[in-house]
């Protein structure tokens, strides 16, 4: 009936969610629609899933299609007459996205696709699969032109875009945001008609009075279409080598070789576990999934790319034997049923981390190996969060930027003004609707399908250069497409780079990746770093929250670090279980147990649920759920599953079983609270263990090669802190920091002995081509001898040369910067042409410049302006006569006392209280560059807000939280910089 329905996956156009579209059909008694989002097939799986589950009682036939537009105007609609037609439509759109070709005005589809044109764009001689859609408002015009068209080709075209007038208003806001236009000036050609909402069949018949045949023909077209979607059945590539038999023989051979290499002499326990895993993998037909992952790892090893295998698959002995992971599941007693059990339908999760420098090469290999038409990256849908939505809506309402900034920083600012209240109202309403803004790229998901990928989705081509699916991971899993996670991180990069830097700088060949973790955890230097939270730069353990946690736990061993890696995640930390774990960790076994079964299940973590598999353990052994039900519960910890009927059914079964077992109601509720608190944010133990191994490798390098390590961290970027603080950490470790130098520096930072030469990359306004030219010219033709020599050899703009002089890049010439600036200026002066007639001989004038040395203060300000930070102690730049009465190292001696500190802000983190109020945690350096941490409760945060980078005067009470001192701030005021020009 309705052949042009939109959801909110017509990005910044439609306002109905897939479920709302179905509800509109039910409310209006509509039983046939075509789902035709604009250049998108993101919605169809969600629609069909709802029809299979929640709304199975309602007979609604949905046919997928795509609305094609050029310059924001509809040119035709493609409707899939069958699954082959859907594949054609997806391939067609993907082709144009991939090659950035404009859409043809008349595409050539097979009869598997019905093409519907508008009345004014339709070609004269229609093919058998081509039709013309007539909108209600076009009927009068048709009365005078009906002789031009074949009656049997005319269809009723009543688009559906929103629910009602409110939906139309939201649609207009979305269109104004998309067009970057004031709402009052939004051109009507860029927005839908106000009548694009669903109506009962009787109302449509009134609109098409005299033309009812069009409604019948639209109905008939949908009726003739046949589209099927299969849920749950795997669509992944079925074989690596070409057949299941070949795959199995190769897989078994490689796994047995790996078993021998990893474990050497066999014993009955190890052999039984190995054979059990192999049998379940064979039964569940996961062989190809393992082999494709194994093949990827083999490629990486051939290329010398280090990797970390984690996720629930890290619990697998077979994965360990194949070298996919490097954590022994037997040694760590990893829960087998978390990653694999006979009830599980999806393959185990392998999260494979590569260095950010190598990941794209691995992804390219996967596309080349498995056919680009069967492979794509996994998409995700970004939504506009409150602050972004507020700014966008305020902008289209015409508010000046200064007012938008005030409203964004303080929503209370708008509560007294009717106009501003209107902006806030629309913002809250739009955010609550969770409109997807666009298709983005999942952090690491890669899809490889047996059929061409277009059988399931169209693809986008983002700047990254790999095609991306329209649907997200939840929809992919619904129809049985299970992702391979190929992720990148900076930790692997800085470990590999540090190993090379140590060899180049000290001539030592080291590799902590070849030292067993059991040896690393006994290293006194590493123990000292962990116990004191001195972990800046170290993978996964450097954030203020993690440093605090390690200090509170007085962590000294691998298993505690493994637990800490999961405890720090939001699911555990925000539920209060982190606090419980710390208390029990220090209790020497004297704590009040929730229930003996909990203590037995999680003996290692004092009866506290810390890992993902703990959900399965507790649900299965305590709650009496089957392993299949327990896995649904685990998956339900991610919010998108939590509203589904299958999750609610399992939740009810948990309470029913527990009450039948006779547990106390308070215990049942408490355990359920702990289960539900995980919210998809916890780690599997194998995942945490893999991270902890990498953390130990980082810690080893920091403990024994701190200066080289910091250079590795600086060159890989992406750490928790800004580069400035890694530079300061290197200086504290004994390094001499040299600003970029034309005769010593490379594009990235390098080291000679204990002298670190910052790379040209750190100069904010220096063009990359200039920096690279300097390095190439120096390597090819030797060092620069003078500023004149540099100017001759390097084509450079005056402003770029001035930047280099001010930052000290010519310091090796032992001339003051101000002299060099005068000299540089003279090099750009145009020489006057000589006059042919000289009546008098003029003697050359020799100008002498006064002594103009650059002071330490000027040098620091130049660094601040050009690099963004000083390379020395920043307190040289503070403009304050206020003196603190306490320093960071003295806090432990002043517990419960009121103190005053001056702090240079390192980082802050905002969080929300249970009452949804904002509070902050801060990290600062004192004038001795020692770190201290602060907590700012909501009232203080509002009264004394952070005002950007710089120095702060902080007054408050010192509190001791599990042997970790913090400042509970009561008063805060920002202090100025000495130079009034820098604010």
Image (cartoon, grey):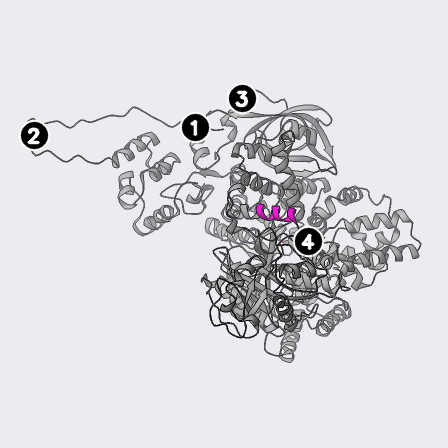
Residue identifier under label 3: 880
Say which of marks 1 and 3 sits in front.
3
The segment highlighted magenta reads 159-172
Q: Secondary structure at mark 4?
A: helix
Cα distance in 3D space between marks 1 and 3: 18 Å
- On screen, residue 493 above or below 64: above
Quick one: label 3, few (<14), some, or many (20+) residues within 10 Å? some
**What is the quadrant of residue 354 in the picture?**
bottom right
Cα distance in 3D space between marks 3 and 4: 45 Å
Residue identifier under label 2: 838
Q: Is residue 143 visible?
A: yes
Residue 189: % across, % down: 51, 51
Pointers 1 and 3 in contact (C-beta within 8 Å): no
Mark number for residue 688?
Answer: 4
Pointers 1 and 2 in contact (C-beta within 8 Å): no
Residue visible at 32% across and 41% down in the picture: 797
Residue 924: % across, % down: 60, 33
Sequence-wise, the earlier of marks 1 and 2 is: 2
Say which of marks 1 and 4 sits in front.
4
Quick one: label 4, few (<14), some, or many (20+) residues within 10 Å? many
Say which of marks 4 and 2 sits in front.
2
Cα distance in 3D space between marks 4 and 2: 85 Å
Which residue occupies the foreground of this view, 42 or 504? 42
């Amino acid at each position: 009936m309705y052949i042009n329905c939109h959801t909110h996956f017509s990005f910044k156009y439609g306002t109905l969610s897939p479920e709302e579209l179905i509800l509109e059909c039910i409310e209006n008694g509509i039983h046939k629609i075509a789902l035709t989002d604009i250049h998108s097939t993101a919605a169809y799986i969600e629609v069909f899933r709802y029809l299979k589950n929640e709304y199975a009682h309602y007979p609604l036939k949905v046919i997928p299609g795509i609305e094609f537009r050029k310059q924001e105007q509809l040119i035709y609609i493609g409707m899939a007459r069958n699954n082959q037609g859907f594949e054609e439509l997806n391939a067609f759109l993907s082709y144009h996205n991939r090659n950035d070709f404009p859409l043809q005005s008349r595409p050539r589809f097979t009869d598997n696709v019905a093409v519907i044109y508008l009345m004014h764009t339709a070609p004269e001689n229609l093919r058998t699969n081509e039709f013309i859609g007539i909108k209600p408002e076009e009927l009068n015009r048709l009365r005078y032109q009906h002789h031009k068209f074949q009656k049997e080709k005319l269809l009723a075209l009543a688009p559906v875009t929103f629910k009602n007038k409110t939906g139309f208003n939201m649609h207009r806001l979305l269109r104004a945001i998309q067009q970057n236009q004031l709402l009052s000036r939004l051109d009507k050609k860029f927005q839908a008609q106000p009548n694009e909402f669903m109506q009962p069949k009787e109302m449509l018949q009134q609109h098409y009075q005299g033309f009812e045949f069009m409604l019948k023909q639209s109905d008939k077209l949908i009726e003739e279409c046949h589209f099927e979607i299969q849920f749950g059945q795997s669509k992944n590539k079925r074989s690596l080598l070409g057949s299941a038999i070949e795959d199995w023989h190769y897989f078994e051979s490689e796994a047995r070789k790996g078993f021998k290499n990893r474990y050497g002499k066999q014993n009955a326990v190890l052999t039984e576990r190995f054979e059990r895993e192999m049998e379940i993998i064979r039964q569940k037909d996961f062989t190809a999934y393992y082999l494709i992952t194994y093949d990827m790892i083999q490629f990486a090893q051939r290329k010398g790319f280090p990797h970390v295998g984690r996720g629930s698959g890290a619990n697998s002995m077979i994965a360990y034997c194949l070298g996919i992971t490097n954590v022994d599941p037997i040694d760590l007693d990893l829960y087998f049923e978390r990653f694999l059990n006979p009830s599980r339908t999806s393959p185990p999760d392998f999260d494979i981390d590569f260095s950010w420098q190598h990941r794209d090469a691995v992804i390219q290999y996967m596309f080349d190996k498995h056919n680009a038409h069967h492979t794509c990256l996994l998409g995700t849908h970004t939504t506009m969060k409150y602050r972004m939505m507020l700014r966008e809506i305020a902008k289209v309402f015409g508010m000046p930027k200064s007012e938008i900034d005030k409203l964004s920083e303080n929503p209370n600012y708008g509560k007294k003004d009717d106009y501003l209240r209107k902006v806030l109202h629309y913002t809250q309403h739009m955010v609550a609707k969770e409109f997807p803004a666009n298709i983005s790229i999942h952090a690491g998901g890669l899809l490889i399908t047996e059929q061409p990928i277009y059988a399931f989705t169209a693809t986008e081509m983002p700047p990254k250069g790999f095609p991306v699916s329209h649907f997200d991971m939840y929809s992919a899993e619904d129809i049985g497409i299970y992702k391979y996670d190929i992720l990148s991180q900076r930790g692997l990069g800085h470990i590999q780079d540090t190993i090379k830097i140590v060899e180049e700088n000290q001539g030592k060949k080291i590799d902590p990746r070849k030292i067993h973790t059991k040896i690393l955890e006994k290293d006194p230097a590493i123990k000292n770093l962990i116990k004191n939270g001195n972990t800046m730069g170290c993978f996964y353990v450097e954030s203020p929250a993690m440093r605090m946690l390690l200090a509170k736990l007085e962590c000294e061993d691998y298993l505690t670090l493994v637990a800490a890696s999961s405890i720090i995640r939001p699911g555990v930390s925000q539920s209060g279980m982190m606090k419980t774990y710390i208390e029990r960790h220090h209790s020497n076994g004297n704590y009040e147990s929730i229930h003996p079964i909990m203590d037995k299940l999680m003996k290692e973590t004092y009866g506290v649920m810390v890992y993902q598999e703990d959900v399965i353990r507790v649900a299965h052994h305590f709650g009496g759920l089957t392993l299949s039900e327990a896995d649904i519960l685990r998956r339900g910890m991610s919010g998108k599953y939590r509203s589904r009927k299958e999750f609610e059914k399992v939740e009810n079964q948990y309470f029913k079983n527990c009450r039948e077992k006779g547990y106390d109601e308070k215990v049942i509720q408490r355990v359920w609270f702990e289960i539900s608190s995980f919210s998809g944010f916890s780690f599997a133990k194998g995942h945490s263990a893999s991270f902890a191994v990498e953390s130990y490798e980082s810690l080893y390098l920091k403990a024994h090669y701190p200066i080289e390590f910091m250079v590795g961290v600086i060159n890989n970027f992406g750490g928790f802190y800004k580069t400035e603080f890694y530079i300061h950490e290197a200086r504290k470790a004994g390094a001499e920091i040299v600003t970029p130098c034309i005769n010593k520096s490379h594009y990235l930072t390098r080291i000679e002995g204990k002298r670190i030469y910052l790379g040209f990359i750190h100069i904010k306004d220096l063009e990359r081509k200039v920096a690279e030219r300097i390095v190439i010219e120096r390597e090819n033709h030797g060092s620069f001898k003078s500023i004149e020599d540099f100017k001759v050899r390097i084509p450079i703009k005056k402003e770029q040369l001035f930047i280099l002089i001010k930052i000290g890049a010519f310091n090796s010439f032992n001339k003051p910067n101000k002299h060099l600036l005068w000299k540089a200026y003279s090099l750009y002066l145009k020489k006057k042409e000589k006059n042919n007639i000289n009546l008098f001989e003029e003697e050359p004038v020799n100008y002498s410049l006064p002594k103009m040395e650059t002071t330490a203060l000027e040098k620091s300000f130049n660094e601040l302006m050009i690099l963004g930070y000083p390379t020395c102690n920043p307190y040289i730049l503070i403009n304050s006569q206020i003196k603190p009465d306490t320093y960071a190292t003295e806090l432990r001696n002043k517990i419960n006392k009121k103190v005053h500190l001056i702090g240079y802000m390192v980082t802050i983190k905002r969080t929300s209280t249970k009452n949804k109020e904002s509070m902050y945690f801060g990290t600062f350096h004192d004038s001795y560059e020692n770190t201290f941490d602060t907590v700012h409760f909501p009232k203080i945060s509002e009264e004394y807000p952070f005002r950007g980078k710089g120095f702060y005067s902080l007054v408050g009470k010192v509190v001791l939280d599990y042997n970790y001192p913090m400042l509970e701030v009561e008063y805060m005021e920002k202090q100025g910089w000495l130079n009034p020009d820098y604010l």
